Image (cartoon, rainbow, N blue to C red):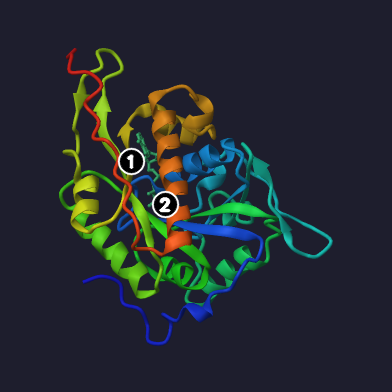
Amino acid sequence: MGATVPRGLAATSDRSTIPTVRHAIAVASGKGGVGKSTVSVNVAVALAETGASVGLLDGDIYGPNIPIMMGIKQALERSETGKITPPVQYGVRLVSVGFVAGESDAIIYRGPLVGKMIQRFLSGVDWGDLDYLIIDLPPGTGDASLTLAQSAPLTGAVIVTTPQEVALADVRKCITMFRRVNVPILGVVENMSYFLCPRCGERTDIFSHGGGRAASEELDLPFLGEIPLDPRVRVGGDEGRPIVVANPDSSLALAFREIAGNLAARVSVVTLTGPDAVQIELPKKEPESSRSC
Ligand SMILES: Nc1ncnc2c1ncn2[C@@H]1O[C@H](COP(=O)(O)OP(=O)(O)OP(=O)(O)O)[C@@H](O)[C@H]1O
Ligand SMILES: [Mg+2]
């Protein structure tokens, strides 16, 4: 089970470095559509709100949707040094292959080209001094994810999952991949945890509940937090105004900020003491309301 790493590729010495980036953090998942890009965008903006300098790299070279979610579409500019100058949106510097390809272009990169493209985005971009570079990965543990996990100088990875029982298998796949390339797992985020009825406040556990927390407990990983299923999150993504920007005082924005805070704490711990040091334990939250429609 899990990712197969071609012989000789697991060496961390293959990683390029970005001297001005303190922490590169990959956001990954075992399968598609669980909310990696949503989490990447909102956590990046939430970190920037705290005063940190933050970059966001759309590592999903096959299906880049960070430009839409961040509400920005523009051709990449180059500085005098020939490097790409990342545009800034909501306080975050961002780069996406979506800036170079048309919105409906089918993007086909095979084998070594994937690596080349990723290298270009890592070392060919004038990121400047960054506290955090959030890298949104494509779904699963395929070629592009693996290449990125191997070649980016990652402090660690965040795994996004949904609450179903089967989530454990997906999380496990991801972990196997990152462990094989010596990247620490910073923690697990459970997205689409439950649905809170906007009219009556009743909570429904659509995909069951707690799979992400259970997975992190079983696999001995920190649990960074949970985000409910809420149409405002999708609308924010579609309209290019992440929920932390569009509804900054909502409980959703708060949940993303809490995850960002836990992530920053975990990054500090891993940096200072190594990946196996401390688990962050979040208090178990009671449902916000048990009233029904
Ligand atoms: N908590 C949420 N509540 C409601 N909708 C959500 C939530 N999280 C994500 N979505 C929506 O679900 C869809 C998939 O989310 P997203 O694109 O972030 O997932 P992904 O894991 O990056 O997908 P892919 O694997 O295709 O890259 C998007 O339309 C997004 O707006
Ligand atoms: Mg995505």
In the displayed structure, does residue 250 sit left or right of residue 189?
A: right
Residue 3 image position (x, y, % from top left): 30, 72
Residue drawn at (35%, 78%) of the image? 5
Please count the marks in the image: 2
Does residue 38 appear anywhere in the picture?
no
Label 1 crowd (10 A; few <14 / some 14-19 / many >=20): many
Residue drawn at (23%, 46%) of the image? 213
Residue drawn at (42%, 29%) of the image? 254
Where's the C terminus, which quadrant?
A: top left
Q: Which mark is residue 43?
A: none
Residue drawn at (54%, 35%) of the image? 240
Does residue 102 appear anywhere in the picture?
yes
Distance, label 2 to label 1, CA atoms, is 12 Å
Q: Which mark is residue 225?
A: 1
From the viewer's side, name the closer residue of 34 and 75. 34
Name which residue type carries label 1: Gly
Residue 233 image position (x, y, % from top left): 41, 32
Describe the element under mark 1 as helix, strand or loop.
strand
Label 2 crowd (10 A; few <14 / some 14-19 / many >=20): many
Name which residue type carries label 2: Arg
Q: Which mark is residue 266?
A: 2
Between discs 2 and 1, the one toward the N terminus: 1
Question: In terms of image quadrants, where is residue 7?
Answer: bottom left
Question: In terms of image quadrants, where is residue 122?
Answer: bottom right
The mark lying in front, picked from 2 and 1, is: 2
Residues at badges 2 and 1 in contact (C-beta under 8 Å)?
no
Residue 282 image position (x, y, % from top left): 30, 40
User: Vertically, is 255 above or below 262?
Assistant: above
Label 2 CB sits under 8 Å from any ligand 1 atom: no
